[in-house]
Structures are given as C-alpha cells and as structure tokens.
Image (spheres, rainbow, N blue to C red):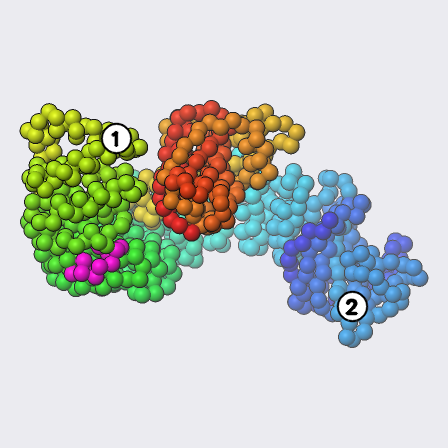
Amino acid sequence: MLLQSHAKLYLTNPPPPQTCSSTPMCGGEHCYRAGRAWEASLMTLHYVCRFQAHDSGRGHVWCFHGNGEGQCHRRHCAEEAGLSLHVHVCSPEAGSGSPGHQHPVQGLLGPQSNGARAGPAEHVQPQMYIQTPTDPSVKLLGAELCRNEGFRIWLIQDVLLRMPGVQEYIQQPILSGLRDKASYVRRVAVLGCAKMHNLHEDSEVDGALVNELYSLLRDQDPIVVVNCLRALEEILRQEGGVVINKPIAHHLLNRMSKLDQWGQAEVLNFLLRYQPRSEEELFDILNLLDSFLKSSSPSVVMGAAKLFLILAEKFPHVQTDVLMQVKGPLLAACSSESRELCFAALCHVRQILHSLPGHFSSHYKKFFCSYSEPHYIKLQKVEVLCELVNDENVQQVLEELRGYCTDVSADFAQAAIFAIGGIARTYTDQCVQILTELLELRQEHITTVVVQTFRDLVWLCPQCTEAVCQALPGCEENIQDSEGKQALIWLLGVHGERIPSAPYVLEDFVENVKAEAFPAVKMELLTALLRLFLSRPAECQDTLGRLLHYCVEEEKDMAVRDRGLFYYRLLLAGVDGVKRILCSPKSDPSLGLLEDQAERPVNSWASDFNTLVPVYGKARWATISKCQGPERRGLELPNTASFAASGPLIPEEDKERVQESSGSGVLMLVPNLQLTAECFEKAWLSLQVAHQQALPWQGAVHPDTLQMALQVVHIQTIAVSRAGAQPWKAYLSAQDDAGCLFLMELLWEPGNSAVQISVKQSEPRPEALSSFMSVLETVIGTIGDIKP
C-alpha cells in the first residue's frame, strides 16, 4: 500500500563518487557513505518530491520521487547510532548492473530496458528511499539521526505523527525536537506534543513533558511561545487548561510586540485568566495594552478591548474610554468586505448600544444598507438604526427605512416596517403617516406587516388610535397571512365602534370560516365578533349566531370548539358577565416602559465580548456549546441481529454526561446524525409504531424545502418522494442526546387535507416523544402550506 504526501528535497553538487563493493547489491556501482558528505548534498537544488511508504516485507521503505537532474546514485550505506540505514537515490538513466538486474523500485517507476539510458527528451525521475530494519525498536528515524533541519521537521510531521502503528515510539524523538537548535523544529515538536497527547488520551499527563513546555514559554522564538500555550491548553484541558501566573503574565506582556497578529490575539485570550493583585499592577498592565487598541488587526483590537473591560470592572470610566477607542475599528469592520467580519462587528455594536445608547449616533449613516449586501447584514443594520434614532436624525433614518419597505426581498421589507413601528413608540406621528402611505401600495406582504404594527402601536400608544382606524378600511382584501388576519380581526373587534365597516368585514370572515385553515384565526374571530356585538348588537347578532353554531356543531378542532362553547354559555349567563370578562382595557401605555430596554452595565456582558455570544445570543450559544464536545461514534446497526438487540447507541463512557443532559427535561437532537438507508430500513422493520398523528397539510412540498426546514432542527431526511408524486412520502430520522432514535414516516394522499405521521422509537420514552412531536409539529406547521 502506498501512502502519499508532499515534501521538498534539495540536492546539489554531490561529493565525488567512490567505488564500493561492500555488498552484492552495489555491484561496484557508485555509492556514498552517509554522513557529512551526504548532508552537504541536501542543500540548494530545488527538488519537488512525492512521499511514498512501502512495506517490502523486510522493513519500512520511504520513497521520494521528484524532478531534477544529477548524477545517478544507486545506494548510500551508513551506520549511525548502531542502526543500518539504507538510502537509495536512483534514476531511470542508470543502467542495471548486470543482465536481468531489476531496478530496486521498478514497480514504482515501470519497466526499464537493460542497459538503457534516458534520452534528452525523456522525463527523468530520480528517487530516494529510506529503509529501516524490521525490529520495532529501530523502526523510527529519530530527529537526531539527520542533521538537515527540513528533514527533521519532515520526520516529526509526516513520519512520527502520521505513520500508522508507530505511536508508541514517538515520545523520545519529539522530546528531542523540543531541545532542537532550529526554531522551526521546536515549533513543530511543540505541536507534536499536543498531537501525541490526543493519540494517548487515556494515559496520564506526563509531568516532565508539561514542565518542558512551561520552560519553553521563555523561548527566543515567539511562535514557539504561542505554540506552547496552545499545546499546554490541549494537554491540560481536563485540569482547567494552562495556568497563567504573575511571572508568565508579565513575560507574555513584554513579548507581545514581537508576536504576529495571530499570536497577539491568542496571548490576549490567555491573559484573561490572570487577575492583577494590586491596583498599581492593574494600571501597569493596562498601559502596556493601550497600544494594541490601535492595531490594524480587528482580532487584536477586540481581544485587547475585552481584556481592558474585564480588568477594569471596578472602573466604569475606564471601560467607557475603551469603548470610545474601539469605535473606529468597529465602524471599519462594519464596512469590511468580509461578510462574516461585518456581521460579527454589527452584533458587537448592538451589544455596546445596550450600555451606551447614543454611542454611535453621530455615525448613523455608516449603517445605511447597500444594495449588494446580503440579507443577514441588512437585517442587523436595520436593528442598529432603530437604536440610533434621535431628534437630529429621525427624519433621515425614517426616509432610509421607508426606501427599504419596497425592497424586492419580502423579508427585508417586512423587517424595515417593523423597525418603523419600533421607532413609532417615540416618534408616533411621522411613523404612522409613513405606515399609512405604505398601505396604499396594496401589496400583500406589506399590508400584513403594517396591520400587525398598527395592532401593537394602538396598544402602546393610544393617541394614534384614530389615525389607525381611518387607515384600516380596505386592508382585508390584501391579507392572506394568518398573523395579518389575526391582527386585523383584533383591531376590528376592539376598536370596531370607530370603524363603520367593521361588522361587515367580520361577516365576510365568517362566511369563509369553513375554508379557514388556521384555528388561531377562528378563535380570534370568535372573540372579536363577541366584543363588537356588545357595542353594535343589531349588526352582529345574526353573524355571531351563525359562527357559534358552526364552532359548536361542525368544527373539528377542539380548541375552537371549546372556545365557542365557553362563549355560548357565557351569553346564556347574561350580557353583564360577558362585559366583565371581555371588555378589558383597549390599551395600556404603561407597557411602553417595559418595552424600552434599560441600560445594562458593561460588566453584565464584558465576558461575552469578542465571543460568539453576541452573534448567537446567550441562550442559543449555551445550547450549541452543550452539544459540542467529544465526537460521537457513528450509528452502526448489526447485520445479523435485530435493532432491539443492537445495544446502546452511544459509547458507555458517555453515559454519565448523557444522563445529566437528559435530566434537564429539554430535548436536544444530535446534529449531523449519519444513518444510512439500509440501517434505517432494518430499524424501521424491527420497531413498533409508538405514535401516529395527522397534521394539516395543503399539498406536497418540494423535497429541497422540506430538507432545509428539517436540517434547522437536526432532523435527517432519509428519503423523500419527488414533488407532485401521489401518494407523497418522506422518511426521516433523528437522535436525541440520550441516545433515543426517532424514525418517522410522512404520508400524504391526494384529496386529504392532513399528512399522516408515524413515529417509531428505539426506546420507550414518552416524555422525549412528546417533546419531539412538538418540534416536528412546528416544522410541519411552517412548511405544510407551501406548494411545490
């Protein structure tokens, strides 16, 4: 078997050939003694090689292939440290020593003619391979066996750490590499220590190795220092990571200027673990860090800012000054061509605005959206603009947001409308006028969101109720969305006495109630019509009677039926009882104070600065971090036994951690579950159906749409029918963090308004099944009405 990698070999001016007849293989050919003469030949002639490992039965053979010209050498024999090391450098241009003599690596080069020499036009490929004896104790080439720096690096990187079956022999060569005179060899050897630890995770931590790495923190090469920190962090992970005490912290601070940007960002992260012992020491450290706030690297600036914020937790004015200094780098990052950097910077800007609301107000134009920017960056900028509005820029910001409301992206347009609604709580008149003008466009996605915004606005700002009621007539013609219908029905029910056409609009909804697919709309219609009946009984009595009859006698949804029975019995008890229950306040301006976010102290989020918490949110990031950890083994189902007898789906060593996570009561689905179709079929046939349910469905969805929606909640699509197939089926799988496997079948038949769901479990766990069905219902409810 051949293993390939890349390397470089440098050959030039080989020493004069010597005649050698020490072994029959040489046959009097040119041969060299390994030693300084061969070391001198590994210098300057560029030689791009291909590394191959070959087991010849007599030992391990490492071969280099490359392009170059030079004198042909058949064999180098050397003895170092009592080992027999065979080095062959061969070329097709070399003739065989005798008739019938075969090239040592002819299988790699191809057949050659006896006595033939390569012509000028032929492709010359010299080769070198190194062979070691079969004794396991001498299978490895230690780094000290070769005096060439590049060769020693190659031995550690490609041979010691990558060759299979030699892990037990790698410690001594790596320890030797830590003391190597060449800095690049020390860099590779330090990282090799972490790799060696990963290869022997079950073994105890070697105290001598840890002490050696700690001593290398004072190495003259700055990259060696940073690599030592990374290696120690990996090796001591179970013990809390590398320890940063006062001498180490001050040494790292003094070496910061010699590190590159990556090293500086890494060291700043490690320095977070050190707590100064006095105020004087604290400000000495802050003075040393001040220059890094002006670095050209965003990662260094953010790392230094976070260290400032945490060290100066008792000095709020220092924290404010630091945030003022990072304003420029953050604004530059928000305009970066890197979309990822721009998005992360915008998330951090929003985090800073929680504590300093007007921090970026003078730079509000920096957050105007460009047409070429991706959707997620536009949404973040709109959120930032809402927090930067003041008396000086409100008109410019509203005009900018108004332009976004007609964007080709419906989602972005709706986000801009919601943003105007948020600003309307402070600047009501300007915003209501803009929203009223948007209704005149008669576009469904715009009308839906504007009505939802009006519903929230009249509850928090009752002074705008009259303007909203005047703008509502005619909106019902352009609303098809469930949320929009509910908002409009609520407005008609609560403020219907101010809207002349309110009873007749609600009557149209009642006429089409049988075709309504959303139970929430029906329940909102019941409440609104009963409220309007109290203020306009003559116009609503007949409509309310028909609606109650339908809900009690014909409706299949139990929630709607129960709501209808409740209102019917309430009316039987008397109108006064209805008024006491339904005639609640129509608005509550005091809730506006709750909507405004209070200023949060910097210390409440300083530890989350320069992390992914501002991007994901604290709760979601905690969930993601919980899912991270040791990689789980792939799910394997035996071929000869049933699924029920296949044993646990997770390793035994993870049982305790799994039990702790499952005890929290929150369903956590494992991401990236790999289950083949064959394993799914065997498991499906061996298990019994644990749950069956029918969910509303208006047609088969496109397979890509279904797969994308399910991937969000970590449900794997095993197989799915093509769009338009009759009947339409889909098979899904998922696994929770406790090892319980869920197998599902979705079946939709023509003429059926519901999709049949069958679920099977590897373990009988009703709580997990109930939580899983809630997740699945949410996904199905989201995509069930999307047609291919």
In-image side of 107 versus 355 (left or right): right
The image shows residue 269, relative to residue 579, as above or below, that is below
Q: Does residue 241 show up?
A: no
**Which structural element holds mark 2?**
loop
Q: Identify the residue position indicated by label 2 in the image.
A: 71
- Figure quadrant of residue 532: top left
Q: Front-most of 686 and 159? A: 686
The image shows residue 750 at horizontal and vertical percentages of 44, 43
Few, some or many residues within 10 Å of mark 1 (<14, 14–19, 20+): few
The image shows residue 726, relative to residue 126, as above or below, that is above
The image shows residue 652, relative to residue 116, as above or below, that is above
**Which structural element holds mark 1?**
helix
- Give residue 553's mark: 1
Q: Residue at x 90, y 54 (%)?
A: 24
The image shows residue 660 at horizontal and vertical percentages of 42, 27
Q: Amino acid at mark 2?
A: Gln
Q: CA distance from mark 2 to mark 1?
A: 100 Å
Q: Nearer the viewer, mark 2 or mark 1?
A: 1
The answer to the question of whether label 2 and label 1 lie on touching residues, with beta carbons closer than 8 A, is no
Q: Front-most of 413 and 503? A: 503
Q: Residue at x 68, y 40 (%)?
A: 165
Q: Does residue 560 show up?
A: yes
- Figure quadrant of residue 244: top left
Sequence-first disc among 2 and 1: 2
> Which residue range is magenta in the image?
437-447
Few, some or many residues within 10 Å of mark 2 (<14, 14–19, 20+): some
Q: Amino acid at mark 1?
A: Glu
**Magenta span: helix, strand or loop, mainly?**
helix
Q: Residue at x 38, y 56 (%)?
A: 340
- Figure quadrant of residue 112: bottom right
**Is residue 537 one of those drawn in magenta?**
no
